[in-house]
Image: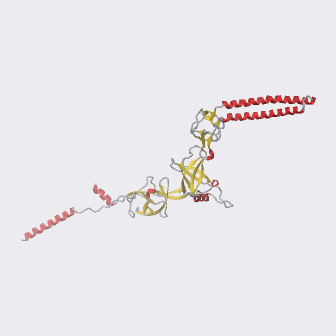
């Protein structure tokens, strides 16, 4: 009986040991914490910036510098001395009419001068003869007077004929039609052999547009114009504002194909009244165009500076997050833990950097620029330094649990 009890106890102990062993094999492994997410970080940039207002406008040559070329004499077009679209110089011969009819008129006028000169010689001799005869009683005083009048009349006709020669010579000169100014010429409106009429309202042979300077026009509201003038000028002793030209207000602009505002000019004119329908006033800037880069009629984007150069803080526009009506950045503290910093966004710059205003953002802060969706406020992250390097926080080492999991996987 005693032996049976001993065997039963041994069997029970063995089964208990086997159960403990089996229960130990089925126990779950300890939970491994994932490593902190990797995020890209960079410092905010401090830049020198000038605040500006932006407008849309257009380039245009001055009305007084756009000239329709017309002939001053009537004739047949003989030569065209330019190619459509050329840059022409002042006094360059553009068109030539057939000069032969004008030269023939010059010859005819000169012959008329010779005729009057010959008649004048004969009249002087006749006058002299009558004066000699009247002393001898062979002629009357009335005959002398008539001879003197004939002499004077022929002298006047000689002068008139000489002036006609000058006029006819001008016609020869006018047969060569010259550029009145330096600029870009359009296409020729007539072909060689065409009859060209003279005078205002007659055929326009071509149009020349001055290139340098060229003007940029745009509309602004009256308040902005007054603000610009107050920024760049002081009232004189009489308490009146000087002209906008004297204030030398700068502007910058770009063409539609430009990537930046590389062109400069000065405001030189503001219209004398505000458009009541739009509440705006037309202003004009003058721009050098000695290289002929700008074409009248082109659309441009314009910036007018409204402040002195000052320091601003800029960050990538994509790093700014939105929480309802508030904007904020994710910033790392000294323990690489994510913190929220509210900011007031300003203007978006050409390189997609955004001006931000906040007393909590410092130039030496590290802001998260990529991996924002993985970062959680009050949780650590693994920062990745910028490609340019330079003082980024050290990349954190893997957590011990993560290292253990990696070893177990091997």
Say which quarter of the image contains residue 280.
bottom right
Q: Quadrant of the C terminus?
A: bottom left
| Left or right of 86 in this view: 4 | left
Instruction: Please tell me whether residue 89 is drawn above or below residue 248 in the rendered image.
Output: above
Where is residue 365? Give x, y as percent. Answer: 46, 60
| Left or right of 44 in this view: 112 | right
Q: Residue at x 61, y 33 (%)?
A: 79
Which residue is situated farthest in the left direction here? 1
Instruction: Please tell me whether residue 52 is drawn above or below residue 256 in the rendered image.
Output: below
Where is residue 299? Give x, y as percent. Answer: 53, 48
Where is residue 8? Give x, y as percent. Answer: 10, 68
The front one of 139 and 49 is 139
- The answer to whether residue 331 shows anywhere in this view is no
Say which quarter of the image contains residue 382.
bottom left
- The answer to whether residue 368 shows anywhere in this view is yes
| Left or right of 30 in this view: 161 | right
Where is residue 316? Give x, y as percent. Answer: 46, 56
């Amino acid at each position: 009986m005693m032996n049976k009890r001993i065997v039963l106890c041994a069997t029970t102990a063995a089964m208990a040991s086997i159960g403990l062993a089996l229960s130990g094999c089925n126990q779950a492994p300890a939970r491994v914490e994932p490593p902190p997410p990797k995020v890209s970080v960079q410092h905010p940039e401090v830049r020198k910036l000038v605040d500006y207002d932006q407008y849309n406008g257009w380039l245009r040559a001055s009305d007084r510098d756009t000239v329709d070329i017309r002939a001053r004499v009537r004739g047949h077009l003989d030569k065209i001395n330019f190619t459509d679209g050329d840059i022409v110089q002042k006094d360059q011969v553009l068109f030539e009419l057939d000069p032969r009819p004008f030269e023939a008129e010059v010859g005819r006028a000169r012959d008329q001068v010779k005729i009057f000169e010959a008649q004048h010689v004969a009249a002087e001799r006749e006058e002299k003869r009558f004066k000699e005869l009247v002393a001898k009683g062979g002629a009357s005083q009335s005959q002398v007077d008539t001879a003197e009048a004939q002499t004077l009349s022929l002298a006047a006709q000689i002068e008139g004929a000489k002036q006609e020669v000058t006029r006819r010579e001008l016609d020869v000169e006018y047969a060569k039609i010259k550029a009145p100014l330096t600029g870009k010429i359009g296409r020729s409106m007539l072909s060689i052999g065409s009859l060209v009429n003279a005078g205002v309202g007659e055929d326009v042979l071509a149009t020349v547009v001055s290139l340098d300077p060229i003007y940029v026009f745009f509309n602004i509201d009256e308040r902005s114009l007054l603000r610009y003038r107050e920024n760049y000028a002081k009232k004189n002793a009489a308490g009146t504002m000087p002209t906008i030209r004297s204030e030398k207000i700068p502007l910058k602009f770009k063409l539609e194909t430009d990537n930046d505002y590389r062109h400069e000019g000065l405001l030189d004119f503001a219209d004398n009244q505000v458009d009541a329908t739009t509440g705006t006033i037309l202003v004009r800037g003058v721009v050098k165009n000695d290289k002929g880069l700008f074409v009248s009629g082109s659309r441009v984007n314009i910036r007018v500076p409204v402040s002195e150069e000052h320091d601003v803080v800029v960050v990538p526009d994509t790093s700014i997050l939105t929480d309802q009506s508030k904007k904020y950045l994710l910033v790392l503290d000294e323990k690489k833990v994510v913190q929220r910093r509210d900011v007031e966004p300003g203007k978006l710059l050409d390189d997609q950097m955004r001006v931000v205003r906040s007393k909590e953002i410092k130039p030496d802060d590290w802001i998260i620029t990529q991996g924002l969706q993985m970062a959680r406020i009050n949780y650590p992250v693994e920062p990745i330094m910028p490609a340019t390097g330079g003082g980024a926080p050290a990349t954190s080492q893997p957590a011990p649990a993560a290292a253990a999991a990696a070893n177990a996987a091997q």
